Image (cartoon, grey):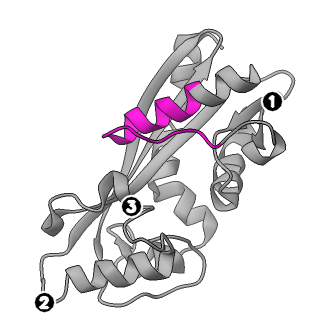
Amino acid sequence: MSGPTIQWVLASNNAHKVEEIGRILAPQGISLRPLREFPDVEDPPETGTTFEANALQKARFVFQATGLPCIADDSGLEVDALDGAPGVHSKRYTPQATAEANNAKLLGALDGVSARGARFVCALAVVTSAGEEAWRGSCEGAIAQAPAGQNGFGYDPLFLPDEFPGKTMAQLAPSDKDRIGHRGHALKGLPAVLDRLKA
């Protein structure tokens, strides 16, 4: 993108997502504002049954509340041996909804399972005055036997991306994670979406 910086809202208070998505969007002339900068706006609902439905629901809610172009993501982990779980329930896979508890439950569910194929999925949704669109990106890999690495969050310490054999997502440099990760893949589709929406 060219021209002046455009102010967008990210429909999330997750500091990790603000940093990661903001880092990828910055070269495109988009300045990202986290939802916490709008204290009067409630947390957006997430009641959809797919990643795309949740992302659109969040983006619509925040766009209507702020009047600013909005981008939202809904992302999670799909494990083949668990029929796609935790899926859209990745964040709240356990009552505690913490990375430690979620990862421990996942390892327990895969105890003794040798086929550990999985993927990270990210659905992005854009809502502007010109329209809306949702799409997804993914990163294929497998679930490790034990967590490793300090650079990621969520399920990153357990996810072994195909592009870096033997390393978890949490062991990668941020630039490598941006390049191969599910959010990075999804965000590559943003310029075409903006062109279609003429935002």
* SS type, badge 2: loop
Q: Are marks 1 and 3 in contact (CB under 8 Å)?
A: no
For badge 2, the amino acid type reads: Gly
Q: CA distance from mark 1 to mark 3?
A: 29 Å
Looking at the image, residue 130 lies above or below residue 170: above
- Picture coordinates of residue 60, whole percent (x, y): 57, 25
For badge 1, the amino acid type reads: Gln
**Sequence-wise first label, 1 or 3:** 1
Residue visible at 55% across and 12% down? 131
Task: Specify the farthest residue to the right.
Answer: 4
* SS type, badge 3: loop
Mark 2, residue position: 112
**Sequence-wise first label, 3 or 2:** 3
Mark 3, residue position: 90
Mark 1, residue position: 7
Looking at the image, residue 144 lies above or below residue 30: below
Residue visible at 32% across and 68% down? 162
- Picture coordinates of residue 149, whole percent (x, y): 53, 85
Is 62 left, or right, of 121 in this rendering?
right
- Picture coordinates of residue 117, whole percent (x, y): 20, 68
The reply to whether residue 72 is visible in this rendering is yes
